[in-house]
Image (cartoon, rainbow, N blue to C red):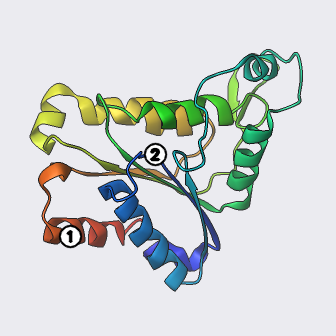
Amino acid sequence: MSVANAVNNVLIVTAHPVANSLSHSLTARIAARLRYQGAQVDIADLHADAFSPAMRRADLEVYHGDTQALPADILREQQRVERADMLVFVFPVYWWSVPGLLKGWFDRVLTLGWAYKTAEDGRIIGNLPDIPVRLVATAGSDLTGFDKHGYTTALHTQVVEGVFGFCGLKDVTLNILYQADSATPEQVEDFLKDLDNVI
């Protein structure tokens, strides 16, 4: 995949509960391609890792500045991000957004002081290095349905801008495999070929 020559370490985060799902298949295919091109790939399978998406008191204490002691699971995830020079997120679209498990990863891992900070004048400043972020989503609906109801725009607003843009990341792309539940192997292959232009 084209960017891989400039990328040495990739973190792929996936959030699907079924090991033989299309999300996991896409994750494996993307990882294999990146490894073939010489990148080191770390896969964070949030279900297999039993990542807890629920904000806890310790998370809120960090957010409010009452402590700087991160929970161990969050420190581990942040270290994974810090090692990466590309982030790839592979997930199904649930209710026109990311799965709750992945949303919880955003909530807990992208902490104040690490992913973003507040300037003296009160402005929020993204604090993460501006590395490429690739969002690879599978959706049951078609493009026409997404666009008719503004769901593609909503994903851009919520995730591309609202999460990653907020944290200072500008090189963010969203690729969606529409009608994924009925996609043929040929359609999946075509989708993977399209990803060659961004990953």
Residue at which label 2 appears = 15
Could you say whether the residue bearing mark 2 is in a helix, strand or loop? loop
What residue do we see at 12% from left, 53% from top? 182
- Where is residue 124 shown, x and y percent of the image? 68, 25
Q: Earlier in the sequence, mark 2 or mark 1?
A: 2
In the image, 119: left or right of 182? Answer: right
- Where is residue 173 shown, x and y percent of the image? 41, 52
Q: Label 2 sits on what residue type?
A: Ala
Question: Which quadrant of the structure image shows residue 154?
Answer: top left
What residue do we see at 16% from left, 66% from top? 187
- Where is residue 46 shown, x and y percent of the image? 54, 46
Instruction: Using the image, determine if residue 37 lies above or below residue 177.
Output: below
In the image, 59: left or right of 48? Answer: right
Q: Is residue 121 visible?
A: yes
| Mark in front: 2 vs 1 | 2
Could you say whether the residue bearing mark 1 is in a helix, strand or loop? helix
In the image, 38: left or right of 198? Answer: right
- Where is residue 155 shown, x and y percent of the image? 35, 34
In the image, 25: left or right of 4? Answer: left
Q: Nearer the viewer, residue 45 or 114?
A: 45
Instruction: Using the image, determine if residue 154 lies above or below residue 191.
Output: above
Q: Label 1 sits on what residue type?
A: Asp
Q: Count of labels shown?
A: 2
Question: Which quadrant of the structure image shows residue 85?
Answer: bottom right
Q: Which mark is residue 190?
A: 1
Label 2 to label 1: alpha-carbon separation: 23 Å
Question: Which quadrant of the structure image shows residue 21?
Answer: bottom left
What residue do we see at 53% from left, 34% from top? 163
Labels 2 and 1 touching (C-beta < 8 A):
no
Q: Is residue 110 visible?
A: no
What residue do we see at 74% from left, 17% from top? 60
